[in-house]
Image (cartoon, rainbow, N blue to C red):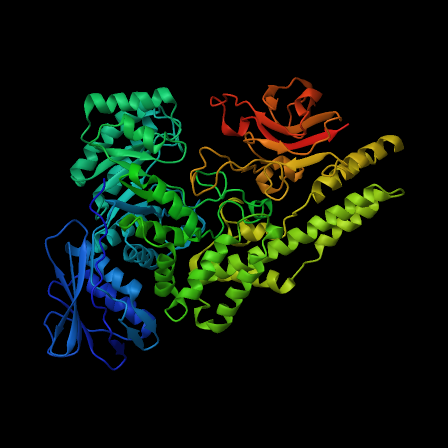
Amino acid sequence: MMKGFLAIVFFIPLLCTVYARAQVIIVTKDKQVAAQVLQEEVQRRTGITWPITDKMPGKGQVIVFASIPCAAESYHIHTVYEKNRQIIKVEGDGTRGLLYGAGYILRNVQYDRQQVTLADIRDIDAVPEKAIRGHQIGYRNLANSYDGWTAEQYEQYIRDLAIFGANTIEAIPFMPPSPHFHLPSLDMNLRISGFCKKYDLDFSVWTPATFDLKDIDKRKHYLLQFDTLLRQAPRLDAVFFPGGDPGDNPPQQVIPLLEDLSVALKKYHPKARIWLSLQGYTPDQCAFVYSYIHQHQPMWLRGIVVGPSSPSLEDTRAALPAKYPIRHYPDITHTVRCDYPVAWWDPAFAYTLGREPVNPQPLYYAAIYRFIAPTMDGFVSYSDGAHDDLNKMEWSMLGWNSQSNVRDMLIQYCRYFFGSTFAEEAADGILALEKNWEGPIADNGGIPATLTLWQKLEQQHPELGGNWRWQMCLLRAYYDAYTRQRAIREAALEADANRTLLEGGDAMGRAEKILQQADSIIMPHWHDRIIALCDDLFNSVALQTSVAKYKAAGPERGAVLDFLDHPLNNRWWLEDKFKYIRTLSETDQRKALDTIARWENPGPGSFYDAVGNIGKSPHVVRTEDLHTDPLIRRSDAPGFDWWESGRSRKRMSWMISLRWPSAMRYEHLDSTAKYVVQVTGYGECLLRANGVLLTPGRYDKGIGERKEFAVPAALIKNGTLVLTWDPIDEEHLNWRQHSRVTEVWLIKI
């Protein structure tokens, strides 16, 4: 629910500079935690300890904390001049409002060793736009770092989130042991609850039922676990139950479970309520839930959560009684196979960085947030590790003011975590990291420039070597640049190998030797630095970048080190094809090698597109971009299949697909020639040429198998051909079984 707006009123800035010997005293009459946070975080960054007192001193600079009646969570900062000194007054709505006021100061002062400059602290009145601004930081093995944290690391991270404006922390209890755990699951979750009580933040838990609810014994055990948690938790404000992701129970069984759970919840935490998501539910199941809510108006239900595989925010709002709020569950942690994929990501990144790399995307997520903000009452983001740290801080700030300037937010982030002297440079470096992922990797000359910027900062600021957020930025800068160099090199090697296949003699043997040149590491000093940074990150923040080395939960769980040298061309597929081709007759060998060699170069007047590859799809029409379609509802973005845990030896173009290209356009064709369209992909393919449905002459549906459509000559009299696809209703199928297109040839015959 909208709660006011963020109003910033600029008056006279504080022009004083406070040095180590100058006296800055924090005044609070009721031992506010905000005063402690301000004192400790300034000391951590500068070595200066600002004393805390309950009496107004007669001299020196003063920061006064005072709780006053005002809008929920709001704070006010203003300056008073008295006896040739400045007094900064921070007034807020209890503990939480004052903590946000302290956070504003901490994000905006200028830090240096033994020096603090308060010049940027201005008069401000702030009220958050959204009532719910939270993040899920679950202590579980599937997370790529949280399961390796100590209680002290959890407390610091919760404090950092609050400093950037978060008011909700969501945990994941009832988890099996992880090899990285410092404490059992229940113990750590109780600690997290205690930290939330200390900082006056809402504590929520995400608790799916991954068993059949008709199993009475398992149902009893589930509720018994809850009873233990509820009795011992210092604070609990909300329970989030995902309907079907994970879990596979219909709402007819889920709702009675939640009704039973609400009894114990009310007993131990009377103000706590339950949130339900409709993730994975069919339209009929969603209709059942809405009907139940309209009919029974349950008091135990706080509202509905909209997350991945849920009905849209708009549809949910239209179906839900107005008194029930909507909480979004945005996936700001993943890059592919998710709600908010990186649009038109180069495959070289998709198959090395994968699904959970370090992923600061400030411009992208700001666009998403602003688009969806009017339809939600707040959010608790889905996060599976520290790699998305900047995204969390940005969403927290946008929850206060959706129109906050992106670069200004990044400067605050860098100032607080890296220091003030180069905050703008570091902010620009983060923006550059996001730009690294735009367009074809080989054509993005900004990638090496981004590395140069971060290398310069790395050399100038060795004191940040142990800072895990700094290490993450460096890792991305080196990894992106290294991957680009490999992509360029391995594309050239494959092109050389294909040319060799058109020659006589032992062409396959010579081609194999060419492809094997990729075994020698390119840019070994970058390679070594990436390995060292992965090791540093495991030691500093338990980031698990390898399954074998750091016991990551799986290859998709941030294991970027395991894919550092993953082939970026079709070497594996070619090697396997050569083994088969060597069993054929000489004539058949020649035909097979000619097909392979000309795969992406079908000859003069003919064309090839790997439709989901940003660098190999010149004829694919891209209708809209993220400025007008940030949720990619009216356009499309490629999907990247994850076969054999990322180690599939199939041709790479078969793993990159569009459900259907919006259109493919060819100009200046030979109007006197005959053309055939060939397509690979999976499943069905209803193809139209200039609006006319084509009849296939060949229609193989398997992965990598071809369909063939003759184009009537009358359709291309003007030399222009537009291919489109009729959609097919396959919503009853799992998305992995949906029909799709991977490659398209227009062959002149």
369 lies left or right of 425: left
Query: Which quarter of the picture shows residue 291?
Result: top left
Which residue lies most toward the bottom here?
A: 21
Vertical position of residue 164 compared to residue 576: above or below: below
Up/down of 552 relative to 429, above or below: above
State which quarter of the image contains the C terminus: top right
Residue 486, by quadrant, is: bottom right
Q: Quadrant of residue 30?
A: bottom left
Q: Position of residue 609 (x, y in %)?
A: 65, 36
Residue 539 appearing in the image: no
Indicate the position of residue 703 as horizontal and vertical percent values: 64, 29
- Residue at image coords 61%, 52%: 443
Q: Residue furthest front?
A: 718
Q: Pick the quarter of the image with the N terminus.
A: top left
Task: Please state if 588 lies on the left or on the right of 538 as rendered.
Answer: right
Q: Work out whether residue 451 can be spotted.
A: yes
Asked if residue 189 is positioned above or below residue 468 in the image, the reply reads above
Q: Residue at x 37, y 63 (%)?
A: 417
Asked if residue 679 is positioned above or below residue 519 in the image, the reply reads above
